[in-house]
Image (cartoon, rainbow, N blue to C red):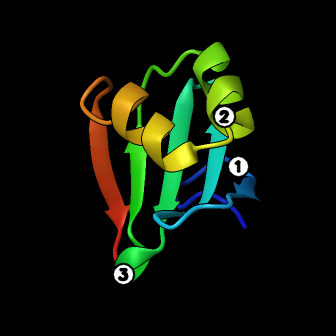
């Protein structure tokens, strides 16, 4: 699966989560994308440090990490809704 933004290629990884379907990151742009299970929404976060991406990806509780370490901490846009 790839990002929705023109010219940016983000490949997603699946999450074992009740909230999140998959996550993707572009280190050149520091851009994080989170595809939510509910209604196919994709949220995009700007200026996310690479270490945050690694911790998010490896976290055993991605929903909690997402809510506490990403939501409200970075500029957010909804880029897709099915």
Q: Nearer the viewer, mark 1 or mark 2?
A: 2
> Disc 1 designates what residue?
9
> Disc 2 designates what residue?
26
Q: Are marks 1 and 3 in contact (CB under 8 Å)?
A: no
Q: Is residue 28 visible?
A: yes
Say which residue appears at 46% left-offset and 64% top-offset. 19
Numbered circle sitting on residue 34: none
Horizontal relation, residue 20 to residue 16: left or right: left
Horizontal relation, residue 54 to residue 18: left or right: right
Q: Considering depth in this image, is 16 or 80 the residue closer to the camera?
A: 16
Q: Nearer the viewer, mark 1 or mark 3?
A: 3
Between discs 1 and 3, the one toward the N terminus: 1
Quarter of the rendering occupied by the C terminus: bottom left
- Numbered disc 2: secondary structure: strand
Q: Is residue 5 visible?
A: no
Say which residue appears at 49% left-offset and 22% top-offset. 48
| On screen, residue 79 above or below 40 | above
Quarter of the rendering occupied by the N terminus: bottom right
Say which residue appears at 65% left-offset and 47% top-offset. 24
- Numbered disc 1: secondary structure: loop
Horizontal relation, residue 72 to residue 60: left or right: left
> Disc 3 designates what residue?
39
């Amino acid at each position: 699966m790839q990002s929705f933004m023109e010219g940016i290629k983000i490949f997603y990884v699946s999450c074992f989560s009740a909230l999140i379907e998959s996550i993707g990151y572009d280190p050149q742009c520091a851009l994080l994308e989170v595809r939510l299970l509910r209604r196919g929404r994709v949220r995009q976060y700007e200026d996310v440090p690479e270490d945050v991406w690694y911790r998010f990806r490896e976290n055993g509780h991605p929903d909690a990490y997402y809510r506490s370490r990403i939501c409200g901490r970075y500029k957010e846009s909804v880029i897709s809704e099915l």
